[in-house]
């Protein structure tokens, strides 16, 4: 299990939302990249040095500090879409290989390289920017039905990461709430929502949503 690439965003215009820019255009970088816990949501800060988000209402902050997506899932989408998808092509900061990102447990912790520890917090929910960036008609629906969302992670221990760093799963909590399960519950299968409260590491924003929607 390792990182194939570490990807940092290049700001570009965002015609798909009423925003001045988007940071979805993530590109692999060479050499080490500093990783640290960002400030609160609303500041635009994320975990990787040199990166940021512009839709500050919906992205960024400690619970969405780093976004990881598996190369194996990118390869699946390459086959289905009949097009090339580069590392970083889904806007992910970390492109992994050998890591079952979508079946990671909420609260699971990964050590990456010698220094960095990240904690799985929640899935990515697709938005208009993602659909516009890929230029695939009906992409939000298609991505949602596939339930391969990738994972947001918190920064527990800062440091540096680089391509080829090993990824070690150093802790797995005792529940069975995976990234995929949270995504399915919050999109097309709300009957699964009560199961999510077993994951104490689920962000409070998501836990409050579960409480509101479950009698």
Image: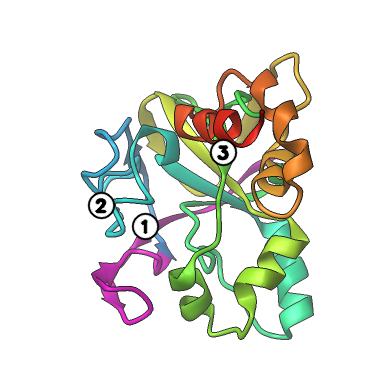
Q: Which residues are magenta?
A: 1-26
Give the x, y percent position of residue 189: 76, 48
Q: In percent of the image, x 47 and y 79: which residue is there?
A: 132
Left or right: 205, with 2 as reference point: left
For the C terminus, give its image quadrant: top right
Image quadrant assignment for residue 193: top right
Q: Residues within 10 Å of mark 2 (few under 14, many from 20)?
A: few
Q: Is residue 11 visible?
A: no
Residue 122: image tag: 3
Distance in Å between CA atoms under marks 1 and 3 = 20 Å
Give the x, y percent position of residue 121: 54, 32
The reply to whether callout 1 and callout 2 are in contact (CB within 8 Å) is yes
Give the secondary structure at mark 1. Answer: strand
Q: Which residue is mark 2?
A: 50
Q: In percent of the image, x 69 and y 16: which residue is there?
A: 173
Q: In percent of the image, x 63 and y 25: which residue is there?
A: 108
Q: In percent of the image, x 67 and y 70: which residue is there?
A: 141
Distance in Å between CA atoms under marks 2 and 3 = 23 Å
Residue placed most toward the observer, 59 or 33: 59
N-terminal label among 1 and 3: 1
């Amino acid at each position: 299990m390792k990182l194939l690439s570490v990807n940092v965003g290049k700001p570009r215009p965002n015609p798909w939302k009423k925003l001045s820019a988007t940071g979805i255009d993530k590109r692999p970088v060479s050499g080490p990249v500093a990783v640290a816990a960002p400030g609160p949501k609303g500041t635009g800060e994320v975990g990787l040095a040199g990166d940021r988000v512009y839709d500050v209402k919906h992205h960024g902050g400690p619970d969405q500090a780093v976004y990881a997506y598996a190369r194996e899932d990118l390869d699946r989408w390459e086959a289905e879409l009949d097009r090339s998808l580069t590392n970083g092509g889904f806007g992910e900061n970390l492109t992994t290989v050998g890591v079952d990102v979508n079946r990671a447990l909420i609260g699971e912790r990964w050590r990456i390289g010698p220094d960095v520890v990240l904690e799985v917090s929640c899935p990515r929910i697709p938005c208009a920017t993602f659909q516009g960036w890929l230029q695939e008609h009906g992409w939000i629906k298609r991505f949602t039905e596939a339930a391969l969302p990738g994972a947001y992670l918190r920064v527990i221990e800062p440091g540096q990461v680089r391509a080829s760093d090993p990824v070690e799963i150093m802790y797995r909590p005792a529940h069975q709430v995976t990234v995929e399960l949270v995504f399915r519950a919050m999109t097309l299968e709300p009957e699964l929502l009560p199961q999510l409260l077993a994951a104490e590491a689920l962000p409070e924003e998501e836990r409050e949503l579960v409480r509101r929607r479950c009698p």
